[in-house]
Amino acid sequence: MKEIIRVHLIFKGYVQGVGFRYTAFHAANMYGLTGWVKNEWNGSVTVEAQGDRDSIDAFIEKVRSGRYIEVMDMSMATIPLKDEKTFEIKY
């Protein structure tokens, strides 16, 4: 069984107003991840994603390759697991 991890991601660039949150939502569901995605006041997007490393890597690749999305910088940190069942868009 693969190890489950949780990561805190911050995406910067052209990531708001381009469907990033919806792309993230669908990609997370496609790869079986839990967590959330949220636009921030400074124009960045924050994601917390939980699942196995391969699925998280595939999720990141999927959101970075969105049609209108242009990620210029991304930071990632491993954080403690949470007990949750879904991936949601926070407003």
Image (cartoon, helix red, strand yellow):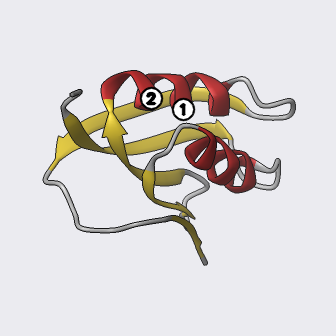
Q: Position of residue 31 (x, y in %)?
A: 54, 37
Residue type highlighted by circle 1: Phe
Q: Nearer the viewer, residue 27 or 13?
A: 27
Element type at mark 1: helix
Q: Position of residue 8 (x, y in %)?
A: 32, 47
Quarter of the N terminus within the rendering: top left
Residue sitting at x 54%, y 64%: 40
Pointer 2 residue? 55
User: How would you rate the neighbour count of disc 1 (Cα within 10 Å): few for under 14, some for 14-19, many for 20 or more?
Assistant: many
Residue sitting at x 23%, y 27%: 2
Q: Are marks 1 and 2 in contact (CB under 8 Å)?
A: yes
Residue sitting at x 44%, y 29%: 55
Answer left or right for 67 relative to 88: right
Residue type highlighted by circle 2: Ser
Q: Position of residue 74 (x, y in %)?
A: 45, 31
Residue sitting at x 18%, y 31%: 3
Quarter of the C terminus within the rendering: bottom right
Residue reaching furthest to the right:
67
Q: Position of residue 27 (x, y in %)?
A: 64, 41
Pointer 1 residue? 59
Mark 1, mark 2: which one is toward the viewer? 2
